[in-house]
Amino acid sequence: MILSFTIFHIIVLILSPRLASAHGDVNIAQYGCNSTCGTVSVPFPFGMNEPHCYAHKWFEIECKFDNNTSSDVPKPYLKSLNLEVIHFYPYSSKVEIMNPIYRSNCQKNKISINNRKTVNLRDSPYIFSQAENTFLAVGCNNLAFLQSNGTTVGGCVSICDDDNNNGNNYNFTSDGCNGRYCCETSLPSHLSEFNATLRGLREQSSDGCGYALIVRHYLVRFDILNELKNREHAPAVLEWEILNDMLINSTFQLPPNCYNSKVTSLSNRTTGQQCRCSSGFYSDYLYEIYGNPYLGGCPVPEQDFYRNNRWKKWVIVGISSSLGSIGFLIGLWFLYKAMKRRMIKKRREKFFKRNGGLLLQKRMSAGEVNVDRTILFTLKDLKKATDNFNKDRILGKGGQGTVYKGMLVDGKIVAVKKFKVEGKVEEFINEFVILSQINNRNVVRLLGCCLETEIPLLVYEFIPNGNLFEYLHDQNEDIPMTWDMRLRIACEVAGAIFYLHSVASQPIYHRDVKSTNILLDEKYRAKLADFGASRIISIEATHLTTMVQGTFGYLDPEYFYTSQFTEKSDVYSFGVVLAELLTGKKPISSVTRSEDSKNLASYFVQCIEENILFDIIDKRVIEGGEKEHIISVANLAYRCLEINGRKRPTMKEVTLELEGIRGFNKKLNAQQNNEEIEFSGIEQYQPWDGFSASNSLSIISSQTHSTD
């Protein structure tokens, strides 16, 4: 019994570093300083009361009661700015505060927007986080302006239907903020001062109550929007750094895991320092367990822990063997493994919630996600499939993440997309929800997802032959891009976009149609991909008001100037893809074209209007296609590239017209291959003026009938 008790103490001593860190026996504040205010933990360099408890007066926290509420729990405030703090994030050097809401023409509290105090962070170590926040405005027929230092730095427009305008009440739907009742736009970089101005679209005033604010972007949901009318403040995120001049004559010394930073710099020079831990051990939610990076506390890398303690395990085995207590040690070992599995399970549950698992489950229960067609993969399965996300398995990288090639245990080849998001998962959830509802052979198929990792993962069918951009602009002599192949790909992509706009249960705007997002399968059939920027809209909606995003060269100029994305914006982007297919030229080029013709869309339109279309058509197209068919497709692209969106055709019209041209092309090829009918084309080139796809098809049709 004594021997067993001794062995137990040896094991406890060996495992104690791990167990201690797991139970949070660490300091997050300076020695002898209070580390909590009410229910909020206050980590250094922030602190309260004594000067040695905080790094500088900018980081001084005042713990006080809110006079506007009856709560008996005090709240922390940044004393120098008088802003309430909700949460501190020392690992990423951010702090979440309650930001004031600017109001105009609101009868409930009659707060005038011109009398509100400007939020001013100048000369402080803080700025508003561009990545975490958005500028939001709510109201009917309002122009909202975000201003800084007397200059307008952003803005958006919110509109209302007269029949649905209910005065000061806006009943937001699950669509969130899409320009109806509210609008939003991104913040400029290094924003340290702001106020807001609301102005009515009409000359006299705006309609009803309006308000504007800077808020965390993931809070722009219908349930939160409906609460804002009764609130005076909303959560926003500030980034911060330890300014260099704060360390002059200071007794505080930064630990070795700190590095130079440029958070508040407008000239890209070092202005301060931030402290973080090694890559892979970043956790703003676990600093109370692992320690505060500003006090040198960082989690021990798991592999180092086991490497450094491997010899201890063998000591335990030797001692237990010699003392006949192997069974006891095995029992303890299984207990330790069970504890470890439990910790891993809890960590995965935390990741599941943080990666939008609860929001996804809510949408599943609401019928927004087709559960029967999607699978929840485990991290273990996907690590095995991608050889632990080996860099040799990378298929491509984009703005939203990295795509890896993988093979599942059943031998199926898949593509695994790892998103570049940390805590903001709207793009991931958006793409998952949209793709789970789409069933079209020319749209890449979603197989499932994995939410139990720090970064969420999506699993797609594997498309083996790369994307259209590579085949058009890096010509493959073994598999040339013939006219027939280009025409077929154009028809398939147009059909896929037509499906999204008009056939899907709810209209879907893709918002990033381009040749790099058109993949080619083993039979070189087109597959439309990358739905991270796509949006589902209500059937009665005519447009979507968002901050402008997209790819230059494909971006609808009307959307760029108005921030209103319509189905005709996808039509414009498809028109650029048609121009690429016809000319073989890149959408933006600074090498092969002159200064006036860097943009393919404008260059293509110019060549058509100057009647020199065939000067820019790809020689493979001229060699393989009939002149009338080429002119018909070019005319269709020309109409898709109209500056005025209302003059562009719909994707249904585009699809039908392309299918018609392709049908004539197939019939002509069959006649030529079988040598049954001698087909003679138009002897003289038709001038562009007055020429359209419809009359070109009628010419071809009449000629074909005349030969029968």
Image (cartoon, rainbow, N blue to C red):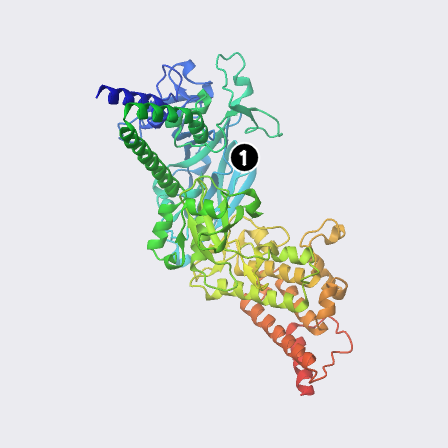
| Left or right of 617 on screen, residue 449 | left
- What residue type is disc 1 on? Ser
| Residue for badge 1 | 148
Q: Position of residue 552 (x, y in %)?
A: 62, 50
* Residue 77: quarter of image: top left
Q: Is residue 425 visible?
A: yes
Q: Nearer the viewer, residue 283 or 29?
A: 283
237 over 2 or under it: above or below: below
Residue at the spot 76% in from the left edge and 52% down from the top edge: 594
Residue at the spot 56% in from the left edge and 39% down from the top edge: 153
Q: Residues within 10 Å of mark 1 (few under 14, many from 20)?
A: some
Q: Quadrant of the C terminus?
A: bottom right
| Left or right of 44 on screen, residue 565 | right
Q: Position of residue 71 (x, y in %)?
A: 27, 30
Q: Is residue 141 visible?
A: no
Figure disc tally: 1
Q: Position of residue 160 (x, y in %)?
A: 44, 54
Q: Quadrant of the N terminus?
A: top left
Secondary element type, mark 1: strand
7 over 199 or under it: above or below: above
Q: Nearer the viewer, residue 450 or 147?
A: 450
Q: Position of residue 404 (x, y in %)?
A: 53, 48
